[in-house]
Image (spheres, rainbow, N blue to C red):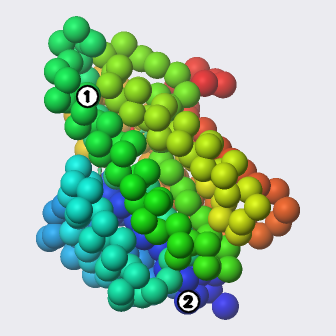
Amino acid sequence: MPKLNGQVALITGASRGIGRCIALRLAALKATVVLAARNKDRLEAAAKEAEEAGGRAIVVPVELENEQSIKALAQTVHDRLARLDVLVNNAGITYSALLQETATEDYDRLMRVNARAPFILCRETLDLLKKAPRGRIVNIASVVGAKGYPRQSAYTASKHALRGMSIALAEELRDTNVRVHVICPGGVDTDMVGDVRPDIDKGDLIAPDEIAELVEYLVTHKGNAVVDELRPRRRTAAPWF
Ligand SMILES: NC(=O)c1ccc[n+]([C@@H]2O[C@H](COP(=O)([O-])OP(=O)(O)OC[C@H]3O[C@@H](n4cnc5c(N)ncnc54)[C@H](OP(=O)(O)O)[C@@H]3O)[C@@H](O)[C@H]2O)c1
């Protein structure tokens, strides 16, 4: 029996990069995947691939800066599927500038997409996750959720916020069937890292499907161990961040 047969997974940022790889992997395990991001054409291309991989796919365009749009996404899952087993808060944006040169609007935008949207989406879907046999939330933070780098103060603040929210929510949900996991990757070979760290040799970067493989582990693992956080780093980065 495929591992996620009959289960529903919602993945934000599924139009490209890490989110697309996560969606395809969960679809290959026969999940129904709800693909959310802004670009409808790219989402539909990912949905076609997800169905070819063996899952069922539903496309829901969303603007994660907008609370009403996030609520509409959650409502679509309630109305069309009435079930949610896995929520992957993956969508994110970055920004590279000295703090003195970072506008308040840029800080707010990063916080809205990277921290506030996952908070709202958790809140709006927790009723379904609690009804699932084993509800799982996977939040994709970053190495900057655990440390800090120059020129990334707004991004770092947003990922610390996401990670902090996840730790609090995991405690809050201890006595329920819902587990909350965080992945803090180092550099991954996607559009995002190409934009802000063109100096890193592409050959040293983590492949996006390696992050999807970790999500697969977290959502299919059935033993007693609970893995709260995973920190994959690119091989040339220093150990133990
Ligand atoms: N790449 C790395 O090195 C790296 C390292 C650590 C952590 N991460 C984290 O991993 C996650 C995925 O990153 P990635 O590298 O795959 O990035 P990416 O290739 O730039 O993809 C970002 C995804 O987020 C969606 N998105 C962005 N803004 C949105 C908005 N306002 N509303 C809805 N969707 C939005 C994008 O879709 P649309 O443009 O279609 O909306 C896209 O699907 C992010 O949270 C990122 O911070 C990345």
Q: Is residue 54 left or right of residue 64?
A: right
Q: Residues within 10 Å of mark 2 (few under 14, many from 20)?
A: some
Q: Is residue 241 left or right of residue 79?
A: right
Q: Amino acid at mark 1?
A: Tyr
- According to the picture, the residue beneath numbered tag 2 turns out to be 6
Q: Quadrant of residue 146?
A: top right
Front residue (pair 107, 208): 107
Q: Quadrant of residue 101?
A: top left
Front residue (pair 162, 215): 162
Q: Determine contact: label 2, label 1, CB under 8 Å.
A: no
Q: Amino acid at mark 2?
A: Gly
Q: Spot the residue most to the right.
A: 224
At which x and y percent is residue 179? 66, 60
- According to the picture, the residue beneath numbered tag 1 turns out to be 107
Residue labelled 2 has its Cβ within 8 Å of some atom of ligand 1: no
Q: Residues within 10 Å of mark 1 (few under 14, many from 20)?
A: some
Front residue (pair 46, 92): 92
At which x and y percent is residue 65? 23, 50
At which x and y percent is residue 2? 62, 86
